[in-house]
Image: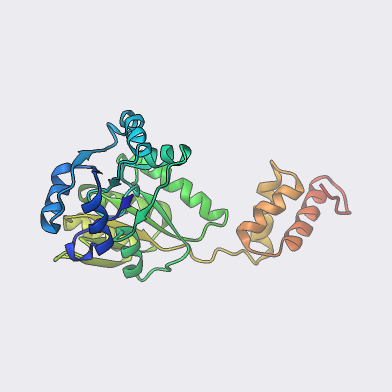
Amino acid sequence: MLVATPIGNLGDMTERAIDCLRHAELVLCEDTRVTARLFSAKQIGARTEPLHEHNERQRIPALLDLLESGTRIALVSDAGTPLLSDPGYRLVRAAIERGIRVGAAPGANAAITALTLSGLPPHPFLFVGFPPPRSSARLDAFGRLRAAERAGLAATLIWHEAPHRLADMLADLASVFGDREAAVARELTKRFEEVRRGGLAALSSHYAETAPRGEITVLVGPPPDESVTDADGLDARLSEALATLSVKDAATLVAGVVRLPRRVVYTRAMELAAARAGRSDPVEG
């Protein structure tokens, strides 16, 4: 059973989650010391064992044997919903492949809570987890997302980040996405909860001067409408695509970016291809 735990406020733990943990014969957790504090507050006496990124793979065979023998096992993370930026995916995947039933007691989730408080479009959204810690890798990851946006992705993007890397992350986001509308949610459900909204440049400047604390979620709004309606803009994109693609493939790619009817883009692609070939009549390709 995958059991969600509070992300800060202990009052957010559901009665069902408490009941599941009280009746579990074994509770797997990231850090037994963190889970022990929760168990003490909720009068839960189940046995706990660690399951984290360093031991998950080697523990899976024995845990599967226990599950197949009927042992009631629950999985929790230090805070929030298991598996989302936390260990457990390999175990769940292996259990599913063995035909073992996996259930869930849902509850608090920092990414969803931050999304609802951000003021940014709530759907679609893309949860990306933690960005790479080094700036070069981070910029590369952000660049791939920006390329996906140019190909048609339009979603609110969500990451978690460590406090000491927040200012640098925001600066890298601004350099890749521009001064996009964004939000930083900190210490959600706790006493010092904060949701700061604004452009990426302003947020980066603020946190460069004000060191943040606590658990942090960063959200970036979807890109502005980049539809191309003028002939020059459409022609430029088609010409670039036609340099390496067929007329059909170029039209399909560009139509997804400019959000014009595919037949319009395809007709113009045939005209440009014919001109490049020195013909006066469009030729399908």
In the depicted structure, whether residue 108 falls above or below residue 74? below
* Residue projecting furthest to the bottom: 119
Measuring from the top left, give residue 103's x and y in whole percent.
38, 52
List x then y, in percent, for residue 215. 22, 55
Q: In this view, does 137 lie to the left or right of 6?
A: right
Report the side of 117 relative to 247 (left or right): left
**Between 108 and 284, which is closer to the camera in this rendering?**
108
Q: Position of residue 115 (x, y in %)?
A: 35, 65
Chosen colour scheme: rainbow
Residue 90 x/y as whole percent? 38, 38
* Residue 69 vertical placement versus 268 (above, below): above
**In which image quadrant can residue 268 be found?**
bottom right
Q: Nearer the viewer, residue 30 or 219?
A: 30
Q: Can residue 269 be seen in this view?
A: yes
Furthest residue to the front?
69
Q: Is residue 14 at all visible to an observer of this figure? A: no
The residue positioned 48% from the left and 52% from the top of the image is: 146
Which residue is located at x 47 percent, y 41 percent? 99
Q: Which residue is drawn at 16% across and 53% down?
A: 44
**In the image, is residue 211 above or below residue 99?**
below
Q: Which residue lies furthest to the top in this view?
A: 58
> How many circles with numbers are drawn on the protein?
0
Residue at (86, 50) in percent of width and height: 283
